[in-house]
Image (spheres, coloured by chain):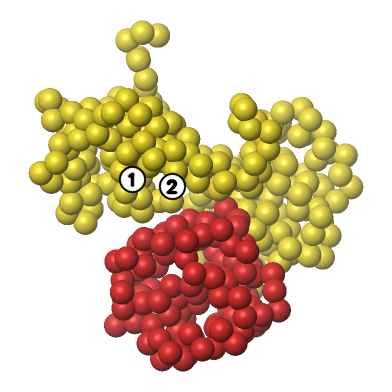
């Protein structure tokens, strides 16, 4: 259970449903770790500022997160959280470890335009 | 920009939030401006066991309590912003943000805190989260059975190196000095750990590999000699830099860019 105001996805089925029903989705898959919390914090604010994007978190230490953990775009990632971006149901890019709000916005502007 | 606050606080770490709690509880109209996530270095700390009155808690838990306390007393907080500059002359002070917004107050409290010091080697930012990590708690298990390097010689470096031996098969500590800047118990814990070895008087200069880290170049500082060392990952714990870039021309800073407080009273 991730202690953040951002909605948490608990199953792979739920993840699949969300990315197929929304055009732009960002999911941060991590723990309540020092590199993860700042990302969740930025996402909380972005939920208000970017209505064009749906924001979710997902616990890393569960097999339900395997679609993210084993995604080709996450290959070589050795730092939490895995931040993945979906457009029209497809994972279009991913970043690893801590990102500030500006970096997240930059990714969204590039891939969700 | 119409509202003029009684107090503006730059920074929402422990000091900034404490100032916000006291200021807003005193019925002063208070705004905290914070670059990054609320909690500052608290949220970079997994377990906090030395905060008076709190036996042991998670860093994010303590940060959330402080944030709630401040907000419950009426303090406003704007986080994840970028401060472009300060105008502290005159009775009304102004803080300008990079996005064009600006805020005014009768008083400003500076509590900007610090950020982890980078190594400043080529490709450091690009390798963050793949080859380079700043958090043993977060990323240690990705290096299970692997050989890794820890850069640094303070308490964080030594304690995190010991933690990382729970995962890695071998941990090599690379430190620029020939002695450690850590508490004796941390030094002894590291020295007695059979998985930890030390390269002293040396600095990491380059990371090598194609997509996956293969080796690093380490310079022996006394001779300037460079040697290659194979490794699977690098963890960096080399202290903090003060967040004073936008304050340099506004307040007096020392040669480490730290704000000189009450210089006339020393």
Which quadrant is the C terminus of chain B positioned in?
top left
What is chain A's hue in the picture?
red
Residue in view at x 13 percent, y 46 percent: B1
Tag count: 2
Residue A11 sits in quarter? bottom right
**Image location of residue B153, percent across then percent down:** 67, 38
Disc on the earlier residue, 2 or 1: 2
Residue in view at x 56 percent, y 58 percent: A3
> Which chain shows up in yellow?
B
**Image location of residue B247, percent across then percent down:** 29, 35
Q: Nearer the viewer, mark 2 or mark 1?
A: 1
- The front one of B192 and B203 is B192
Q: Chain of mark 2?
A: B
Residue in view at x 38 percent, y 73 percent: A107
Q: Chain of mark 1?
A: B
Q: Say what secondary structure mark 1 lies in.
A: strand
**Residue indicated by mark 1:** B77
Residue at the limit of the structure toward the top, as seen here: B265
**Residue indicated by mark 2:** B38
């Amino acid at each position: 259970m991730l202690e953040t105001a951002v909605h948490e996805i608990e199953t792979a089925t739920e993840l699949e449903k969300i990315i197929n029903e929304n055009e732009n989705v960002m999911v941060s898959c991590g723990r309540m770790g020092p590199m993860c919390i700042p990302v969740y914090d930025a996402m909380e604010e972005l939920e208000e500022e970017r209505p064009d994007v749906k924001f979710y978190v997902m616990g890393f230490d569960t097999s339900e997160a395997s679609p993210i953990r084993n995604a080709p775009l996450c290959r070589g990632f050795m730092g939490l959280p895995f931040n993945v971006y979906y457009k029209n149901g497809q994972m279009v890019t991913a970043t690893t470890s801590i990102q500030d709000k500006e970096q997240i916005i930059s990714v969204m502007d590039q891939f969700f335009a | 920009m119409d509202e003029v606050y009684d107090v503006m606080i730059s920074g929402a770490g422990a000091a900034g939030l404490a100032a916000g709690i006291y200021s807003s509880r005193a019925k002063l109209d208070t705004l905290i401006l914070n670059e990054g996530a609320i909690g500052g270095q608290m949220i970079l700390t997994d377990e906090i066991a030395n905060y008076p009155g709190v036996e042991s808690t998670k860093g994010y838990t303590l940060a959330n309590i402080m944030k709630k306390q401040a907000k419950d007393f009426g303090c406003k907080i704007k986080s994840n912003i970028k401060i472009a500059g300060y105008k502290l002359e005159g009775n009304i002070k102004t803080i300008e943000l990079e996005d064009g917004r600006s805020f005014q107050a009768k008083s400003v409290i500076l509590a900007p805190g610090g950020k982890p010091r980078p190594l400043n080697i080529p490709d450091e930012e690009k390798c963050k989260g793949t080859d380079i990590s700043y958090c043993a708690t977060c990323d240690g298990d990705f290096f299970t059975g692997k050989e890794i390097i820890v850069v640094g010689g303070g308490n964080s470096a030594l304690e995190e190196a010991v933690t990382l031996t729970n995962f890695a098969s071998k941990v090599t500590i690379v430190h620029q000095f020939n002695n450690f800047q850590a508490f004796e118990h941390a030094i002894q814990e590291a020295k007695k750990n059979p998985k930890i070895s030390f390269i002293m008087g040396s600095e990491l200069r380059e990371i090598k590999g194609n997509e996956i880290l293969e080796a690093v170049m380490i310079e022996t500082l006394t001779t300037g000699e460079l040697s290659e060392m194979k490794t699977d990952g690098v963890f960096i714990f080399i202290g903090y830099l003060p967040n004073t870039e936008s304050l340099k021309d506004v307040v007096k800073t020392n040669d480490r860019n730290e704000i000189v407080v009450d210089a006339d009273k020393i």
